[in-house]
Image (cartoon, helix red, strand yellow):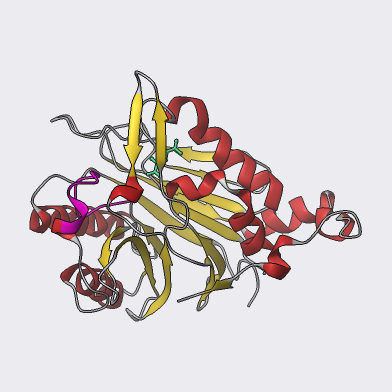
C-alpha cells in the first residue's frame, strides 16, 4: 500500500461532548451528515478525542463500552457503511476484556469494518502548579503498541491519541513503516494548547514528511474540561492547510500525494538517516493495526 493512494478529501468534526451519551452520538451523526452533504465525495471523517463522554477521569467508567459490542462502535460502523466513507472515530472509553478501561480510537473503512484500534499509549498525567492537574492513570490503563494500518484505496496511516503526540517515537514508527498520514484525535486544553498544539502538529509533520491531522473537541460553553479546539491539517512541509477556531465547526482539507512526494524528493531524509550512529526505533517497536 502506498503512503497516500489518492488525493484524500477529509473533514474534521470539532464538537464537544456533554453528559448525555445519546445526545453526543446524535450530535456526531448530525455533523457527519452535514459534512457528507457539503462534500458528497468525502473519503474520510475524523472525530475528536473522547467524543461520547465528558473528558473527566471520574466519568470514563460510566461511559465505557465493549468493542465491538457497544453502541458507539455500532454507530460509527453503521455510519461508515451507509455513507461509504472511512471514519477515524476520535476516541471513547473502552471496557477491555480484562475489566480495565482504555482511551481507545477505532478506524473503520468505507464498508464499516474496523481496520485499526489504538489504545492511548501515554496517559496524560501532569501537574502544573496553580494551572492544571490531570491524572488519566487514576482510572485508565495504557495501550501497548504503536498503530499503523491501511485503509483500502486511501493509503497507510499512523494513529495515536493526544498526549501520545509528545512522544515522537510513535509517529517515527508509523512513517518508517510507510504511513503517509498520521492522525491524532486530541483534547489539549487552554493551558497547554496555546503553547504546544500547533508546534506538535508541525513538528511531527516535518520530522516525518507526512500529513498530520489533529482533531479536537470544541470548547464547552457550559464548563467542565476546556479543550483547546483548533483542529487542523498540516502538510508534509509543516504548512497548516486548515485550522478551526475553538467553537463547534467542521473543517475540510485535501491531502495531495504529490505534495508529499515532492517534499520527500526535495529533501530526501529517508535515504540520509544514519542508523550507524543511532537506532531506527521502528525496528524495535511493537506495532500493529488492531
Ligand atoms: O499534552 C498535553 O498538553 C495535553 C494532553 C491531553 O490533553 C490529553 O492527552 O488528553
Residue 242 in view here: yes
- Magenta stretch: residue 28 in it? no
Position of 177 relative to 167 (above/below): below
Quadrant (top left, top right, bottom left, bottom right) of the C terminus: bottom left
Determine the residue positioned at 16% across, 71% down. Answer: 71
Counting from the top left corner in percent of width and height, residue 107 is at: 39, 69
Depth order, front residue of 121/72: 121
Where is the N terminus found, in terms of image quarters? bottom right
Is residue 88 visible in this depiction of the protein? no
Q: In which quarter of the image is residue 260?
A: bottom right
Instruction: Give the residues drawn in magenta, as a range.
Output: 49-61
Q: Where is residue 204 in the image (x, y as percent from the top left)?
A: 62, 46
**Which residue corresponds to the image point at 39% horizontal and 21% vertical from the top-left?**
129
**Would you say the magenta stretch is mainly helix, strand or loop?**
loop
Q: Residue at x 33, y 75 (%)?
A: 84
Q: Which of 267 and 136 is in front in this view?
A: 136
User: As drawn, is 285 to the left or to the right of 7?
Assistant: right
- Vertical relation: 153 (above or below) 91: below
Q: Residue furthest right?
A: 276
Left or right, residue 200 beside residue 95: right
Q: Where is residue 92 in the image (x, y as percent from the top left)?
A: 27, 59
**Left of 200 or right of it: where is 244?**
left
Q: Quadrant of ligand 1?
A: top left
Amino acid at each position: 500500500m502506498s503512503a497516500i493512494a489518492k488525493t484524500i478529501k477529509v473533514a474534521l468534526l470539532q464538537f464537544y461532548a456533554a453528559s448525555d451519551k445519546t445526545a453526543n452520538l446524535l450530535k456526531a451523526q448530525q455533523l457527519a451528515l452535514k459534512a457528507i452533504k457539503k462534500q458528497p465525495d468525502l473519503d474520510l471523517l475524523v472525530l475528536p478525542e473522547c467524543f461520547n463522554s465528558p473528558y473527566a477521569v471520574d466519568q470514563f467508567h460510566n461511559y465505557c463500552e465493549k468493542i465491538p459490542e457497544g453502541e458507539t462502535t455500532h454507530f460509527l460502523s453503521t455510519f461508515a457503511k451507509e455513507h461509504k466513507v472511512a471514519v477515524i472515530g476520535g476516541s471513547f472509553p473502552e471496557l477491555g476484556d480484562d475489566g480495565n478501561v482504555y482511551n481507545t480510537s477505532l478506524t473503520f473503512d468505507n464498508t464499516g469494518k474496523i481496520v485499526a484500534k489504538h489504545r492511548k499509549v501515554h496517559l496524560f498525567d501532569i501537574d502544573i502548579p496553580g494551572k492544571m492537574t490531570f491524572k488519566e492513570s487514576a482510572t485508565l490503563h495504557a495501550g501497548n503498541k504503536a498503530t499503523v494500518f491501511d485503509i483500502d484505496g486511501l493509503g497507510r496511516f499512523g494513529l495515536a491519541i493526544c498526549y501520545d503526540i509528545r512522544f515522537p517515537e510513535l509517529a517515527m514508527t508509523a512513517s518508517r513503516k510507510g504511513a503517509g498520514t498520521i492522525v491524532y484525535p486530541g483534547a489539549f486544553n487552554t493551558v497547554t494548547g496555546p503553547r504546544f498544539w500547533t508546534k506538535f502538529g508541525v513538528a511531527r509533520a516535518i520530522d516525518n514528511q507526512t500529513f498530520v491531522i489533529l482533531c479536537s473537541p470544541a470548547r464547552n460553553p457550559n464548563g467542565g474540561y476546556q479543550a483547546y479546539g483548533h483542529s487542523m491539517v498540516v502538510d508534509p512541509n509543516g504548512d497548516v492547510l486548515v485550522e478551526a477556531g475553538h467553537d463547534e465547526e467542521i473543517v475540510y482539507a485535501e491531502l495531495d500525494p504529490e505534495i508529499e512526494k515532492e517534499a520527500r524528493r526535495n529533501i530526501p531524509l529517508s535515504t540520509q538517516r544514519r542508523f550507524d550512529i543511532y537506532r531506527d526505533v521502528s525496528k524495535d517497536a511493537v506495532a500493529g493495526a488492531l
